[in-house]
Image (cartoon, rainbow, N blue to C red):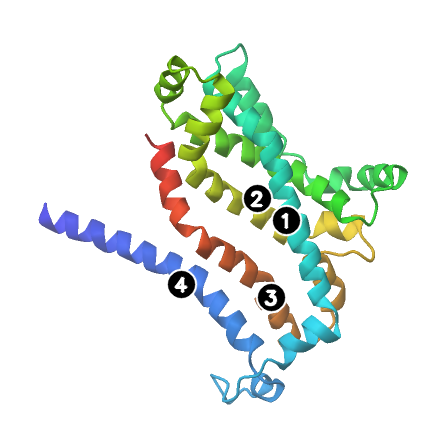
């Protein structure tokens, strides 16, 4: 029995170690090569660079104009979060609090929206945007990203609100609050950590999306679309610098909201 427990723990630790290496090693290599000089990178005799430099990152940001694409990506991601929450919060609340015919089918329908590849609707979407005057605009990209992130927002918020006991709202309404006031003053603050964690998923979806942004924009490109065009035929150190710039904001965003992730799992498993 004791041997079985030890083997089980060793297996868990081994799987955790492999998973950590799977995540950390690529990020470490991206950072290492992004900060390497051109000579050190192409010198096969050196395992680690002897000199670190910000030249490639600086040239990518300022000489090639990636700084403007970063601003565009941040604006699009924040707009996507706002729109997804404005539409997804009421839907998620309704799915968690109200019982109506077809509720489970509605959840399945929401998830099925992610089954269709974006490539199928890319050309019709581009034509529609041209007619509506949304082509090559950040708002147009944010609207497209919202449709991609909205199913996740609805399902996640539904689970989060379902973890908040409805008795809290009922008690608040007994003391004179309306259902909407009970939602704003009771349910929403209790669900805030989970909603903050849900915003991470929305941010990452928008920040990393490249296909739609490449089709819908020509000059107002987001960072992934700009990198796809600018760095495609550049030397490898510039590609690693682009990867570093791409990964850094998401890592910072996740690091800031990491404590809310643990809280979210506690809410949804009540």
- Label 3 secondary element: helix
Residue tagged by mark 1? 77
User: Which callout, 1 or 4, points to the residue nearer the camera?
Assistant: 1
Contact check, label 2 and label 1, Cβ < 8 Å? yes
**Measured along the vertical axis of the image, is residue 233 above or below residue 111?**
below
Residue 81 % position (x, y)? 60, 42
The residues tagged by marks 1 and 4 sit, at their Cα atoms, a distance apart of 29 Å
Q: Residues within 10 Å of mark 3 (few under 14, many from 20)?
A: many
- Label 2 secondary element: helix
Furthest-front residue in this view: 176
Q: Residues within 10 Å of mark 1 (few under 14, many from 20)?
A: many
Which of the two labelled residues, at mark 3 and mark 1, occupies the earlier sequence position? 1
Residue tagged by mark 4? 21
Q: What residue is drawn where x is 54% and y is 70%?
A: 30
Contact check, label 3 and label 2, Cβ < 8 Å? no
Quadrant where the C terminus sits is: top left
**Measured along the vertical axis of the image, is residue 43 above or below residue 133?**
below
Contact check, label 3 and label 1, Cβ < 8 Å? no
Which of the two labelled residues, at mark 1 and mark 4, occupies the earlier sequence position? 4
Residue 166 % position (x, y)? 38, 20
Residue tagged by mark 2? 202
Residue tagged by mark 3? 245
């Amino acid at each position: 029995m004791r041997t079985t427990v030890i083997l089980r723990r060793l297996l868990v630790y081994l799987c955790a170690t492999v998973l950590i290496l799977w995540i950390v090693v690529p990020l470490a290599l991206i950072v290492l090569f992004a900060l390497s000089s051109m000579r050190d990178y192409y010198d096969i005799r050196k395992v680690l660079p002897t000199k670190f430099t910000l030249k490639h990152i600086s040239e990518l940001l300022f000489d090639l104009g990636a700084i403007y694409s970063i601003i565009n990506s941040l604006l699009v991601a924040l707009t996507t979060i706002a729109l997804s929450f404005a539409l997804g919060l009421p839907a998620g609340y309704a799915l968690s609090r109200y019982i109506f015919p077809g509720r489970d089918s509605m959840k399945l329908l929401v998830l099925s929206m992610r089954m269709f590849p974006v490539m199928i609707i890319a050309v019709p979407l581009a034509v529609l945007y041209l007619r509506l005057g949304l082509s090559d605009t950040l708002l147009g990209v944010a609207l497209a990203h919202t449709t991609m992130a909205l199913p996740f927002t609805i399902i996640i918020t539904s689970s989060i609100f379902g973890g908040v006991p409805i008795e809290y709202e009922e008690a608040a309404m007994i003391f004179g609050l309306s259902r909407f006031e009970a939602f704003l003053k009771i349910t929403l603050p209790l669900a805030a950590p989970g909603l903050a964690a849900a915003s991470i998923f929305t941010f990452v979806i928008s920040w990393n999306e490249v296909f739609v942004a490449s089709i819908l924009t020509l000059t107002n490109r987001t960072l992934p679309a700009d990198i796809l065009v600018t760095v495609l035929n550049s030397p490898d150190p510039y590609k690693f610098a682009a990867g570093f710039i791409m990964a850094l904001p998401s890592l910072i965003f996740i690091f800031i909201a990491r404590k809310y992730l643990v809280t979210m799992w506690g809410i949804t498993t009540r």
